[in-house]
Image (cartoon, rainbow, N blue to C red):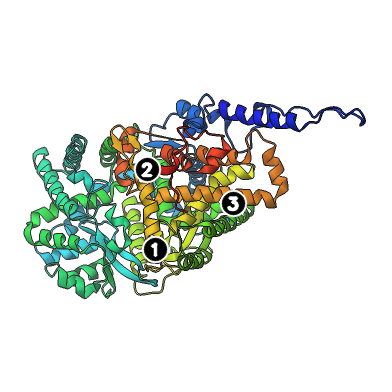
């Protein structure tokens, strides 16, 4: 950092000296201009945290360490967390404190004014918090298990699987609704692979020592749960082995996460009659009736080969195996509402997967469960307390600027031909922007909640949501629907809706700070906006047209040029180490990496245009210690300062389509000439990729 800033200072001082004429003998002398103050003497730009930085590091060597190094050194991951970030997790903790206050008051009969469904919110949260009553839930669970797991033939099995699915417990496979990928205006039923306990199919299939150790830990965990249900240790060990055997068979038939990133791999409109013809041994009519979708006909089967394996298991495994497997999944699906011993055992296993040191306190769990189940009711008092009209207006302006930036960028692309550019512009102009919260709030009239039983309330919430999803089948798409609750700290692009969505939860510092300079906000929130816009044109999103249909609108030449450019991004990230001996999976993370790269480029371009149009903000930004471009890149990096436990980092390499935060910062910056220029990095600096290896898509 010092080298780059001092070099910049010297350039300024040298320019001033060169431009100052010598004293004239015939003209009156004017006092010389005062020297420019050293960079360190200027005020820190609002929105940046000087205490997070490690200024002993050259930004051209390791920008993530430069922006976040002291924060990384001094921050401890909370004992109940697998990771902690200065952005997402810090905001989420603040949001949860607000939601807790709302829910505690509501449960006590003192709901904030304007809280809808206050009785349901208060009863659900209150039942969740009554840990003493959880101890009486086991007999109720066992009575349900007696009804749901005693199948003796395929018809009875289909009935019981359907009943579980109606409660959002998904043994064997998943069933729900989705847009028809080739007709985004319609909703169809969808059956999908599932039925696993471990986070990914590869946990069952990999032969390395760590995967074997995790499978052994999973067996021990499953055995312990069966013991809690009343089995002897010997019988419980056999039950655990049975579960592992069934799940391993399902894992072998499952598509990998990389395969599932290709939309065409997930589209097979077999319809109900086609699924029955493919897998006749499973009584689908019985199943759909029990699942709450008796009349469903329109059906996408994401991976037909998987359902062949389900049929084989139904035909070849004895009823005792079904009973054990169904029992396990029903227990697993109801852990939050079971006695403390079950929750403690689940936490013990989660330590193996994530490295957490301490279980999450009950109030945090209950806030999260309530937000997940009744999120749009809970959101309304949250919005009143946290989200101002100025935040929505500023974000909307930022979105408009980023979309204009994409349009300008599109004009400069030599690799894309005119016909494809024309279609890309049509799609860009049709993107729908949703900011803060929905225009229409969700109706929760049908939710069944019982203050005296959290197990009953838990089942009621899950049953309601599954029925809500299935009720969409055969109807036009509701384009007003949100897929995240407003307090959620996240954002998304939804290809079938061709929309970008920014919940109120994320529109807070450090992503959006009302007091920050414009460049800092463009680096943090502007990059998020640009990231989501770029998702519409990444390797997955580009396959959907302006109306959200899976349709090839690319000319062969532009298609080939795009593939060459994203291949560069895949190769780049394949070379990064995530943790220990694990490399990143460039194919799994490709879409997010392309979006990061495009998002940063768009944010920088939009910032420059914004400052050109707003000279007062430009003067404010220019009077700070760092240049506007430097502020943008620092604002971006500091929103991603993060620490992750090694165990969880290993899990994320297998299941997370995002690169680790260090590479989300250093990875894209190494490709950007704007970054190199901003920090005066030499061509051979560590943060600067050689031109021959530099990746640029959008």
Label 3 – label 1 distance at C-alpha: 29 Å
Give the residue at mark 1.
557
Figure label count: 3
| Element under disc 3 | helix
Give the residue at mark 2.
572
**Residue at (29, 74) in percent of width and height:** 298
Contact check, label 3 and label 1, Cβ < 8 Å = no
- Classify residue 450 by image quadrant: bottom left
Image location (x, y in percent) of residue 608: 62, 48
- Of callouts 3 and 1, which one flags the residue occurring earlier in the amino acid sequence? 1
Q: Which mark is residue 606?
A: 3
Label 2 – label 3 distance at C-alpha: 26 Å
**Residue at (20, 61) in percent of width and height:** 161
**Left or right for 116, reference 609:** left
Front residue (pair 473, 303): 303
| Element under disc 2 | helix
272 up-or-down from 368: above or below: below
Q: Is residue 93 visible?
A: yes
Image location (x, y in percent) of residue 40: 64, 27
| Element under disc 1 | helix
């Amino acid at each position: 950092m010092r080298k780059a800033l001092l070099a910049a200072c010297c350039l300024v001082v040298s320019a001033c000296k060169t431009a100052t004429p010598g004293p004239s003998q015939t003209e009156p002398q004017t006092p010389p201009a005062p020297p420019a103050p050293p960079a360190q003497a200027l005020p820190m730009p609002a929105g940046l945290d000087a205490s997070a930085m490690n200024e002993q590091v050259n930004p051209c060597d390791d920008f993530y360490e430069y922006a976040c190094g002291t924060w990384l050194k001094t921050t401890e991951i909370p004992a109940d967390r697998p990771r902690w970030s200065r952005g997402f997790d810090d905001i989420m903790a603040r949001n949860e404190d607000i939601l807790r206050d709302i829910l505690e008051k509501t449960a006590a009969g003192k709901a904030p004014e304007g809280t809808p469904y206050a009785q349901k919110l208060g009863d659900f949260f209150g039942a969740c918090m009554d840990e003493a009553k959880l101890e009486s839930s086991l007999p109720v669970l066992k009575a349900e298990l007696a009804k749901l797991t005693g199948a003796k033939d395929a018809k009875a099995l289909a009935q019981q699987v359907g009943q579980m699915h109606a409660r959002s417990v998904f043994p064997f496979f998943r069933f729900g609704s989705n847009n028809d990928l080739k007709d985004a205006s319609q909703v169809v039923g969808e059956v999908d692979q599932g039925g696993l306990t471990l986070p990914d199919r590869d946990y069952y299939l990999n032969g390395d020592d760590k995967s074997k150790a995790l499978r052994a830990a999973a067996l021990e965990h499953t055995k312990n749960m069966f013991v809690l249900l009343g089995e002897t240790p010997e019988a419980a060990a056999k039950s655990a082995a049975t579960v592992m055997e069934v799940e391993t068979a399902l894992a072998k038939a499952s598509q990998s996460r990389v395969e599932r990133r290709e939309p065409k791999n997930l589209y097979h409109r077999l319809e109900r009659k086609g699924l029955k013809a493919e897998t006749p041994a499973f009584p689908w009519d019985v199943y759909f009736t029990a699942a709450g979708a008796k009349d469903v006909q329109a059906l996408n089967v994401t991976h037909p080969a998987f359902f062949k394996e389900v049929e084989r298991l139904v035909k070849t495994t004895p009823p005792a195996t079904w009973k054990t497997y169904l029992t396990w999944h029903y227990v697993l699906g109801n852990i939050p509402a079971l006695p403390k011993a079950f929750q403690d055992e689940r936490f013990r296993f989660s330590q193996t997967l994530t490295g957490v040191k301490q279980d999450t306190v009950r109030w945090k769990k209950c806030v999260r469960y309530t937000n997940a189940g009744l999120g749009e009711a809970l959101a309304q008092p949250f919005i009143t307390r946290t989200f101002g009209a100025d935040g929505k207006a500023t974000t909307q302006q930022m979105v408009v600027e980023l979309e204009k930036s994409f349009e300008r960028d599109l004009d400069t692309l030599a690799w894309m031909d005119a016909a494809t550019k024309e279609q890309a512009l049509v799609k860009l102009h049709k993107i729908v922007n949703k900011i803060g919260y929905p225009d229409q709030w969700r109706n929760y009239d049908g939710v069944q909640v019982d203050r005296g039983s959290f197990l009953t309330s838990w089942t009621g919430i899950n049953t309601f949501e599954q029925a809500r999803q299935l009720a969409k089948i055969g109807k036009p798409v509701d384009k007003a629907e949100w897929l995240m609750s407003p307090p959620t700290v996240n954002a998304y692009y939804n290809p079938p809706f061709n929309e970008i969505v920014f919940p109120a939860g994320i529109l807070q510092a450090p992503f959006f700070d009302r007091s920050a300079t414009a460049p800092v906000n463009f680096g943090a929130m502007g990059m998020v906006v640009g990231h989501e816009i770029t998702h519409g044109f990444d390797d997955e999103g580009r396959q959907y047209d302006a109306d959200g249909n899976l349709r090839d609108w690319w000319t062969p030449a532009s298609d080939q040029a795009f593939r060459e450019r994203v291949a560069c991004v895949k190769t780049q990230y394949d070379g990064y180490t995530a943790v220990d001996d694990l490399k990143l999976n460039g194919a799994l993370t490709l879409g997010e990496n392309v979006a990061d790269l495009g998002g940063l480029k768009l944010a920088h371009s939009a910032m420059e245009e914004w400052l050109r149009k707003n000279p007062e903000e430009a003067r404010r930004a220019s009077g700070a210690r760092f240049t506007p471009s430097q502020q943008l890149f620092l604002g971006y990096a500091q929103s991603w300062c993060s620490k992750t436990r090694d165990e969880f980092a290993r899990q994320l390499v297998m299941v997370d389509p995002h690169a680790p935060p260090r590479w989300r910062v250093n990875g894209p910056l190494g490709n950007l000439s704007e970054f190199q220029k901003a920090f005066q990095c030499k061509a051979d600096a560590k943060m600067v990729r050689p031109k021959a290896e530099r990746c640029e898509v959008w």
